[in-house]
Amino acid sequence: MKDKFRPQSGDITLSDLDPSDRSLVENAVKKGFSRREILKIMMATGVTAATANSLFTKSGEAMASTPKKGGSIRMASNLHGPDDQLDPRLFTSTIDYTRGRATYNSLIRHSNELVPQAELAETFEPNSDASEWTFKIRKGVSFHDGSPMTADDVVYSMSRHLGEDSTSVIKSVMSSVKEWKKVGQHEVKAILHSSNADLPTLLGLFQNKIIKNGSTGEGNGTGPFKMDSFEPGVKSVHTRNEDYWAEGANLDTIEITGITDPVARVNALISGDIQMATVIDPKAFRQVEEAEGVTLLSTPAALQMGICCLKNTAPGENADFVKGMQYIQDRERIVKKILKGKGSVGNDTPVMSAHGPDFCSELAQREFDPDKAKFHFKKAGISGAEIFSAPVVSGVQDAVLLAQANCAKIGFDLQVKKVPTDGYWGAVWMNEPVNVVTWNMRPTANSQMAIQFAPGAAWNDTYWNNDRMGELLRLSLSEIDPDKRHAMYCEMQTLIHNESGMVIPAFSNINDGISSNIMGMPSVPLGQLGACEWPELVWLA
Amino acid sequence: MTENNTREEEVLAKLDTFDELPDAPPKRRIKLSWVGKIAVAVVVFWMIIIVIGPSIAPYHEMDMEGEDGFLDAYDNFYLGTDYLGRDTLSRIIFGARNTIGISILATLLAYCIGITLGIAAAVKGGWIDMCISRINDSILALPSIMLGLIAIAALGSSISILIGISAIIYATSVFRIARALGQDIMVQDYVEAAKARGEGLWWIIKSEVLPNAAMPLATDFGLRLVFVVLFISSLSFLGLGIQPPASDWGSMVRENLQGLTYGSYASIWPACAIATFTISINLIVDDISAKSGGSLAKKMV
Amino acid sequence: MMTQMVLRRIGIGFATLIVVSIIVFIGTSVLPGDVAQIILGQSATPATLAQLRSELGLDQPGYIRYFIWLGDMASGDLGTSKAGGASIVSLTSGRLGNTMMMAGIVSLISIPLSVALGLWAAMHPGTWLDRVITFGTLSTISVPEFFIATILVLVLAVELHWLPAIAYMSGDETGWQLMKALAMPLLTLVIVVSAQMIRMTRAGILNVMSSPYIEMAILKGVPRRRIILRHALLNAIGPIVNVIALNLAYLVSGVVIVETIFAYPGLAKLMIDGVQTRDLPLVQACAMIFCATYVVLILIADVASILSNPRLRHPK
Amino acid sequence: MIFLRSLAVVLLRKWYKTMDKLLEVKNLKISARSDEGKEIPIVKGVSFDIFKGQVVALIGESGSGKTTISLSSLAYTKPGLHFAGGEVLLNGEDVLSMAPLRQREIRGSNVAYLAQSAAATFNPAITIGEQVTESAVLHGILSQEEATKRAEELYRALELPDPDRIGHRYPHQVSGGQLQRLMAAMALCGRPDLMVLDEPTTALDVTTQIEVLKAFKKVIREENAAAIYVTHDLAVVAQIADYIVVLYSGEIMEQGPADQIINSPTHAYTRRLMDAVRPKPGAGQGVEVSGEHDRDIPAVEVSKMTAGYGGVVNGEPKVTILRDVNIKVKNGQVMGVIGESGCGKSTLARVMAGLLPQAKGDVKLEGDKLQGSLHDRSLEELQKVQFVFQMADTALNPKQLIGDIIGRPLEFYHGMKGSEKHRKVSEILDMVELPADFASRYPMELSGGQKQRINLARSLAASPEVMLCDEVTSALDSIVGANVIKLLTSLRDKTGVSFVFISHDLSTVASFADTIVVLYAGRVVEQGPTDEVLTPPFHPYTRLLISSVPELRLGWLEETMEKREMAVGISKGVEITSIGCPFYNRCPNAIEGTCNVKNAPIIELNNGHQISCHLKLTELNDVEESTNAALSASESNNVVSISSNWDKS
């Protein structure tokens, strides 16, 4: 796709770009980013400097193609069922996130570049050691039922994630907050157990939506769309919230449904029955790319394709086994053949370029090396192992099969146990000695590593408890000096790279399909379809 | 007149040696139409593949040797490659083992269960019959995919589980047939005769009931087998089928469907494999149970 | 005597329902992970799990939950979905409607069609058209239905753009639009179901055709049409009705794959989702609905064949 | 009166003869095609003619091709057969070469077919009325109304009960004999020129047979239709045929006018057929017993035995089949049990064999009591009492070799193995006059007679004391049957086995049994030595039976019909009663107020001859007057007959 720029370097119009890049630029321009920033962003997505430059000159057009109101979109997610939720603290799937984004607001939202931006909070200020945060709440915001949104609603909503009896999905993530305090009618304060500079990014999580005091959501939010109907496992219909506090959405209505069968989803997209489809299977890339009127959105993200080797039991406890597993990964082929290029090679750490400066690029890339693998397996004295795999992220099953095939070549017997996704997180993940895992990208390298590798963390899914790691995670949060900070991050990534039981051969892009007349798509890499930020932003050309 | 006399003598001679004309024509062998013969050939072909498959397959089913996914036939990828760049032909050859092999095992098991219970119910009758039949009904009443789903979700999807669950699901229909057959064989005079002789139940079942139930059950076997093949394919569709890298036709169709849109036959070939096998079996069954009514129906004007 | 038989059948039906509920309950309760586990998914922690479990009343032992459920069931209360918290009645009613609509339309098309074709084939055995029908149906029942479905989608929706690729209903469709929206699954199911029924009708008739009274009819100079439609059909009704019943049952409970491929919000899919989210009350409810449908259909079939059999209708 | 009519008929027939032929069969050839596709001739060039109003009998045994030939007149062959040559001219037009549609037209309108078993050939799902009128209406011969009217006339003519309603019933609701007559109605409804009657009375009891015969004859004459009458029973033929064609394996042995064939047969095969017809049962037929096997204790004794089906409540089963039966079988003797279908003959045998535990009373084997149910009987007891089933083809497991079938009792009772067993098997085969190599055949490859011999052989193999033979000859053709009887006789003499020989054919029993038990509606109405039973005094029922057995002479039927007693007796069926005389409703001499309320006393006569009847001995002795005297009484209570078919259920 990039190739098509090279021949005519001079003048390309915005429309020549694929929508992801296009929307990138458009948003950047809209937000009045500096030329340097925009260029940086664009380089990150692989656009050559020349192109980027010539593009920027054309960015006037981006401004010109202003959003226009009207139209409706039908979006189909890959997972839905009777467990579809309207209660933000129980959101677990893209379809919930999308409904949440359309119906509710949060205090903080993420920009495409993962910069925390105020939403319902007008401003947010830490105290000196970032152990207390003060949020000024936007005035004149009202829920769909007309009642005004006040600090009480905020305190209520945010406190639902705290405390013993909370069933919040992000309970442990938010555990650094001791309590939420109402300061004034439009001001709240978060008091933390320990200082946390990243709190704002946490507040951008899908579950941190503001709902009406005393409610469990029930579709009554402050968001850009009002909910007309909601049938769990079938669909929900939303119409534009005309008295929205901000400039508001462009689309009149959106329908949010689910098509679990990947083939059906793509077919529906191509035949125009739906305008947005999440999670396009690599097998279907070509189909989508070749089809008329639809576009493949591929956003680089730290969507890890991970294999956990539990360190507290055989065979993972044996470092050489893990090494073997790491060397047997044909990372190039995984990216080229399995992810069809829509992904990036992993270096057995959860952090990657998309995390920006905290990514340790100097850490040597681990290559596919059967002989080393053979050597390590031999050294470990292990001739075979059993890996549990479920399609938790696109391509992971096939990657495992590839590993199996390569293992077979060096006389190592890697048994693949394929299990359905339902029940996987409960019964297999963190239980079976070797299993696959994925994590949605976290906005910061720190939070990304903290989930999995903080000693004793709830989801330390390799049971690799390294005190130095914990220490670094803490220190890095309050380290201001870029170089020192980077050094710390590099040390952490190196630790994970060498000592943890984690094998991360590759990262998958976030791949979605949309019809080509959809403009202004966000590209926040934290989830499908620009981390579900699209409802408020997109318009139809 | 003289030859008339000789004829007379012949006739009388015949009558004296009780060599009367048999009422029924001597047992006729199963005779196949040309279609049936072809069908048999196809089935035999697959059986051979099952046996010698791995030794003739150009690649191993798990090898990802292809340049890329969804390629058309090139040098020794005679049927092209699948979405992962594995050799389609090899996978079909290996797949025969899993798909047909497993189906046959499952069907056999289904027959063991079904016949045992069915005959038991027919012979014993009473509350035993009642209990077995009720349980049987309820399994029938539940959608088989559902049962498969629950069983596999609960026990994991290993080949033995697959065989087990399909066997149980299809044992129900075998049970019905076996029970019906058993019931009307049990009232035959020759069974009465055996009873009158004082034969034990087991002997009666083994040498009176089973031999006479054998043929109808055999023809039914074919149909069941087809159902099992399709059932396992459906499970594969829901991603519960045979475990990778083991290839089975059902999941091969499934996982390569996308290729169709840009002209890859990677999913057509396994589909053809399934079709040739199942259609052949059905054709043979149709042929064997040559519609007795057909001949009479042909006489209608 | 007849009423006796019918009553007996009904009794058997109930017995079956009970056994089913037990089977399903045991089946689902041995599944790994529970609804709480599924809801919280990857982000579950022991604390949150325990909390959610007690909220959902999952901390009681299985058999107690079973009897509670049985009691509610008896009092017509299907309970609420553990996963979504929605009442199961509201969850199922819509789906049930969809399923019934689909099954209804399909059977309206396919039953007359297949009986007619089946009879025709039986009426002219050995003719080329008979062979075509036989082989056609044979091939249809011999390939996986998802393959048929996908081929149809690729041709009619993706390539030709004639029909929608999924059966998406905004709810305000009427008549023709509705038919168009459902065209794909309808087509698939009609093909799949008819094949079975055509074969069975034909076989059923030909089965009767070997009996002496058919020969007698021929010797009385009764024309082919009448032989089939009066002499043979009357005696073949039993088996044919049975096959139809079984196929209808399949249309209600067995069409998971079609519903998946066409993203049609039917009951079967709901049940699968229920299983996947370990939503016991939901699964139970669906299972009961399916089983009940099956029992009723079979009952109807039985009654029909009793009615069609004068020996039972007019005992000496 | 009837004399006059038959006279007129004879004259008419003479006149018809001069008329042109109705059906001409010219050198007809029919063959089957084997799996290998080679032709197997079934009918080998047969020619004969049928004139208007003439009844032509095709007579021969199974495999003689008689049915096949008769069907050719409808341009029809059974599946698997085909016309290989010759022509069949109906009114001068060859039906074989007709267009299919034309063939359909003649079927049912010009030529009508009556099948052997009405039970099977009536469509169970359609009312009798519709089936009877169907063909006539379809061919546009009559409108539905006319057809229905005509059908009712025919019902009357055929003496069927409530003619105006029987049409609305379903086949399963009427008795076998009635169905057979309804068949005739079905055939006649469209006034066909030619009727094809295929063994129409073979499956019936004697008393029923004669009534059906009578009905057929009557209507055939009235309609002056021509008919092809297919049978193997000369005696029947003698009553109904004008012209007889004798067939053997698809060839005509001899043909000619009835009287000529009956009275002066030229062909040896015909004579053979005649011999097979047993003379009218009468005194002096019982075979003299060689005393060697005599012992004082009877082989089998049944006393005060009541049996039936369904749960037994204080000695009364739900459905009582046998009531208070007392019989003795002397050692080495043959006891014939005679009665109509449903009288409980088979049940009696089943009780003795232990297949059906009796509700009351005892069964003794050589003096010591036998347990009711099989399971309680010792192996020895089981081995001593052997049951021979009626239908050889259902009694032999089609999947077992003859050798195994006969061998099984040998190893089961006598623990024989290997070569010993093998030798014994061929010995037994020899005993039943079959070649030893039959051991390696399957039942399917045998003929009816041969199967029946195997059936006997299996029981012989057990070397029993008593053999219970249930209708072993009734399914067989006359000659074959005769041969089987011969065999049994010789076996009896050789082995000294005692036989209980059950049959509905009195003459067969008479020719073979030492003593006869006459069963009626589950009760013994008369028993004693054969000679005694077959000579007056008779029980009225015995008399009815005896006089129902067709005789091999022309005009017998007419004469018999004139005996008014028949008129009363035959038109009704068996009725089970718990009190009173079961024969009450059919008895010409029944005494109302006595016979129907009191159980008949047993009249003891010399050497063990017993009759259970209310009538005085004198009355029983001289027949005619008493009959006529009692007639008025009996006609006043015409009970609609109810056929009884438990042994089917």
Image (cartoon, coloured by chain):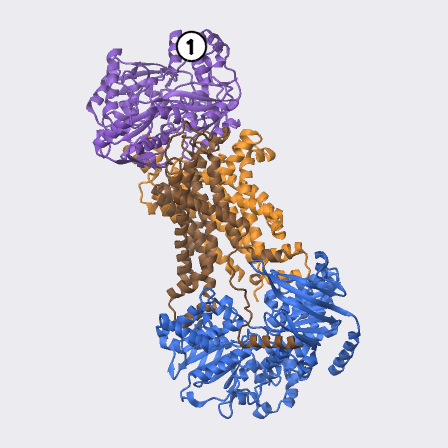
Chain colours: A purple, B brown, C orange, D blue
Q: Determine the chain carrying the residue at label 1.
A: A
Q: x%, y% of residue C94?
A: 49, 38
Q: x%, y% of residue A512?
A: 44, 24
Quadrant (top left/top right/bottom left/bottom right) for the N terminus of chain A: top left
The image quadrant of residue D271 is bottom right
Q: Secondary structure at mark 1?
A: helix
Q: x%, y% of residue D186?
A: 68, 66
In front of the other: A379 or D222: A379
Look at label 1 and name its amino acid.
Ala
The image quadrant of residue C220 is bottom right
Q: Is residue A107 left or right of D118 when viewed as pictured?
A: left
Q: Is residue A461 left or right of D328 when viewed as pictured?
A: left
Q: Residue furthest left?
A: A467
Q: Is residue B260 left or right of D409 when viewed as pictured?
A: right
Where D512 sits versus A86, above or below? Answer: below
In front of the other: C183 or A150: C183
Where B27 sits versus D591, above or below? Answer: above
Specify whether residue B148 is in view: no
The image quadrant of residue A492 is top left
Where D484 sits versus C148, above or below? Answer: below
Residue on which disc 1 sits: A52
In front of the other: A521 or B187: B187
Tally of numbered discs: 1
Q: Is residue D443 left or right of D119 when viewed as pictured?
A: left
Residue at the (45%, 12%) spot, across then down: A6
Q: x%, y% of residue B101?
A: 40, 46
Specify whether residue B185 is in view: yes
Query: How dense is the environment of label 1, judged by Cα within 10 Å: few (below 14), some, or many (20 and up)?
Result: many
Where D554 sits versus A222, above or below? Answer: below
In front of the other: A371 or A82: A371
